[in-house]
Image (cartoon, rainbow, N blue to C red):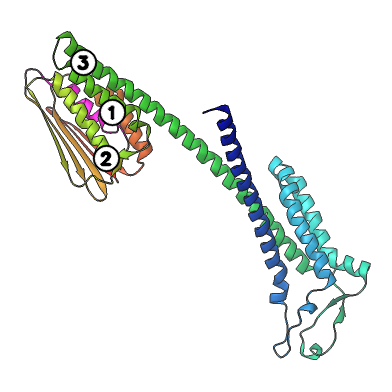
Amino acid sequence: MTSQSLYQEIKTRFSKLKIFSLNKKAAQIIVHIAAWGCFLMLPLIFYPRPVDASFIPEQAVTPYFFISNFFFIGFYYFNTYLLFPKLLERNKILTYYLLIIGIMIFFGIMPRLYQSWFGHFQRFSTSITMRMHSPREFHPPILSPGSIAIFLLVFLFSTGVKVMQKWLNSERRNKQIENEKLHAELSFLKSQINPHFLFNTLNNIYSLAESKSDLTPVAVMKLSNIMRYVLTEARQDSVPLEKEMQFINDYIELQKIRNTDKTSVGFTVIGDVSGKKISPLILLPFTENAFKYGVSTRELSPINILIESHESHIHFRIVNHKHNHGKTNLIKTGIGINNTRRRLELLYPGKYELDIKDEPFTYTINLNIQS
């Protein structure tokens, strides 16, 4: 990619990001306008009126209506973008609540202040004797319960929204950190599996080359196919089950080249595997384990591998004889099985069952993975 094309690519992505940011801000502005529109409509909807008289909206929409709601809306943004982040988020709790109490008192006396500054304060009666009369003069209390109630509603809503945003941002950051840690751990586990597998396979090919076997070129070609899979498909989070099965089959064929006639391998597939996916290299350590501990040059060494594809899950079963009765099995010391168990916990939490039976003469693994 030339520098010019790289510049164009960066410019295009920046433009898209800028447009997305502008669209997001425009959407937020529209949501705020709609929310405040609904808030201002509440007095018109719930304004008390007699059932035998037609409702006149102008009775509720007074100069005080505009002035008071201007202060309520201003307090919402004052609390959201100044008081909360500058005081409450910095643990200046006492200062914050003292200011809130002071502001609440101001809103409580706002009707009385309005009357003292602008003259008569009016409200409309719905009683039977006052239905046909003009608005009557009203003297609001020193602390208006209605104004305090609306203030508390706006305060709780603004603080609740801010707390919810902070919690969501914290959860988003924690989730991002958790995903990054998970990705790093899975990458580390894969980096252990691949060299481990390559080390064993190169040892096998070295044995063939040392004995000047004609099967050496075939083994190298099989290894090439296997490593191509490891370097390409295994980078994905999941691969088609058919490809994983082909990979296991190539590995088995590679092992057959170096093993004697004492070793017989049965690889059976039951069910429709099309459309099924599985984490790459998840079955390899079990297969490696079977060949490492289940093969003998003196005794019969059957290895039976079964893959069953069901509608709801994938069943993997491998059985091999044991020819190292006095030795510790790989399940206890090797990195292959232990890493695979950890990968299963990370990739399929609560969605897999691993049953390992380490009996005196046989070693059986049953793995069920929900698909």
**Amino acid at dot 1:** Ile
Question: What residue do we see at 32% from left, 25% from top?
Answer: 193
Question: What residue do we see at 17% from left, 8% from top?
Answer: 210
Question: What residue do we see at 73% from left, 73% from top?
Answer: 43
**Amino acid at dot 2:** Leu
Determine whether 210 is above or below 26 in the image.
above
> Which of the marked residues, 1 or 3, is nearer the chain's N terminus?
3
In this picture, which residue range is highlighted in magenta? 280-298
Q: Position of residue 42 (x, y in %)?
A: 70, 71
Q: Label 3, on which residue?
A: 205
Q: Label 1, on which residue?
A: 337
The answer to which of 140 and 258 lies nearer the viewer is 258
Q: CA distance from mark 1 to mark 3?
A: 23 Å
Q: Position of residue 258 (x, y in %)?
A: 15, 18
- Secondary structure of the residue carrying tag 2 is helix
Picture quadrant of residue 226: top left
Q: CA distance from mark 3 to mark 2?
A: 27 Å
> Which of the marked residues, 3 or 2, is nearer the chain's N terminus?
3
